[in-house]
Image (cartoon, grey):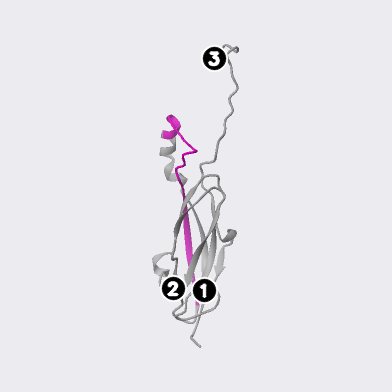
Amino acid sequence: FNFDDAPSASVRVHGRSWEPRISLCQGKISTTFPPTCAGIVSNVACEVTNSSEVPLLYDCKIPTKFRSVFWLPVSTGQLRPCESTKVVCQFSPDADRVFTAPMYCTATPLEDEDQHVSGLLKLARKKEAVKEERVCSVRLVGHGRQPA
């Protein structure tokens, strides 16, 4: 190349976004369980969607102080690009009142053999690895009832 146009060649390049994008419950801010009697378990399925072009590992959590009433039987998994799955949230009230708790979902990109990165760019990506995590949340709302 060396400033000589004769040996020039066109190069096609294809890139993908490395930043994860994830959403819960179709972007709603809350999801509500049906009225549930104390001691009974009710379920709500919350959709986890990977809207990015990279495979993700997701990890959903409910803060410890709410786990006696709300919990997730399976809270982690993997999603391919533009894929969705359902996370089952469970609720079992211990009193006749309204319960609320946040559910947080963290998304981290997975290494993929189709997105090989090498050289200086790989070093730059390692420095930015902390920034790649994305977190979204939804509020779980459950209505506890006394047994009949």
Viewer-nearest residue: 46 or 144: 46
Task: Tell me if I can see residue 59 in this picture.
Answer: no
Viewer-nearest residue: 25 or 41: 41
Q: Earlier in the sequence, mark 3 or mark 2?
A: 3
Q: Identify the residue at the far front of this view.
A: 113
Q: Which residues are magenta?
A: 98-122
Under mark 2, the amino acid is Val
Local crowd size for mark 1, using a 10 Å CA cut-off: few (<14), some (14–19), many (≥20): many
Residue placed at 47% from the left, 79% from the top?
A: 40
Q: Earlier in the sequence, mark 1 or mark 2?
A: 2
Local crowd size for mark 2, using a 10 Å CA cut-off: few (<14), some (14–19), many (≥20): some
Residue 69: mark: 2
Q: Position of residue 140 (x, y in %)?
A: 51, 68
Whether residues under marks 3 and 2 lie with C-beta atoms below 8 angstroms apart, the answer is no
Against 36, is 60 above or below?
A: above
Viewer-nearest residue: 7 or 70: 7
Q: Position of residue 52 (x, y in %)?
A: 55, 47
Whether residues under marks 1 and 2 lie with C-beta atoms below 8 angstroms apart, the answer is yes
Q: Can residue 99 be found in the magenta stretch?
A: yes
Residue 5: mark: none
Question: 109 left or right of 13?
Answer: left
Under mark 1, the amino acid is Gly
Residue 142: mark: 1
Under mark 3, the amino acid is Phe
From the image, tell me which residue sits under label 3. 1
Question: How far is the residue under mark 1 from the one under mark 2?
Answer: 9 Å
Q: Position of residue 54 (x, y in %)?
A: 52, 45
Question: How far is the residue under mark 3 from the one under mark 1?
Answer: 67 Å
